[in-house]
Image: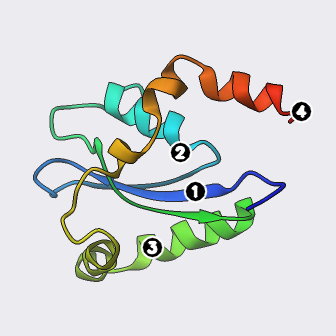
């Protein structure tokens, strides 16, 4: 999305796929890292959702909010079907993100360097 930062709707789960967490954020890498480190505002315990299994990028915040609300209304079987259609192996998509760059603040430095 040239010229604007996208907003992300994301779905996370635990390793047993028994806990599902959905959220919306303008900074997916930072938010996923927070989940993985247990630094979210929700109670963190061993069964917490730390595996990113699905995300969508949307252009505007209101679209992301609407999409998150819609996903929350889906029965679990339909949500899991949506996840499986985009991520059939249910792998942790966080592996594709630059979480270390986020942790080190490189993402912010790069953003400033491009005049944003």
Q: Secondary structure at mark 1?
A: strand
Residue 47 can be seen in this image:
yes
Q: Secondary structure at mark 4?
A: loop
Residue beneath disc 3: 71
Q: Are marks 2 and 4 in contact (CB under 8 Å)?
A: no
Residue beneath disc 2: 28
Quick one: label 2, few (<14), some, or many (20+) residues within 10 Å?
many
Q: Are marks 3 and 4 in contact (CB under 8 Å)?
A: no
**Residue depicted at x 68% and y 70%:** 63
Quick one: label 1, few (<14), some, or many (20+) residues within 10 Å?
many
Q: CA distance from mark 4 to mark 1?
A: 22 Å
Percent x, y of residue 23: 49, 53
Earlier residue among tags 2 and 4: 2
**Residue depicted at x 27% and y 50%:** 92
Q: CA distance from mark 1 to mark 3?
A: 13 Å
Q: CA distance from mark 3 to mark 2?
A: 17 Å
């Amino acid at each position: 999305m040239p010229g604007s930062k996208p907003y992300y709707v994301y779905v996370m789960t635990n390793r047993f796929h028994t806990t599902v967490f959905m959220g919306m954020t303008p900074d997916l890498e930072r938010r996923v890292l927070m989940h993985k480190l247990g630094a979210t505002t929700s109670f963190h315990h061993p069964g917490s959702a730390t595996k990113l299994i699905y995300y969508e990028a949307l252009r505007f915040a209101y679209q992301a909010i609407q999409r998150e609300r819609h996903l929350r209304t889906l029965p679990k079987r339909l949500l899991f079907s949506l996840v499986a259609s985009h991520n059939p192996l249910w792998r942790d998509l966080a592996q594709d993100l630059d979480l270390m760059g986020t942790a080190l603040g490189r993402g912010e430095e790069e953003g400033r360097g491009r005049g944003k």
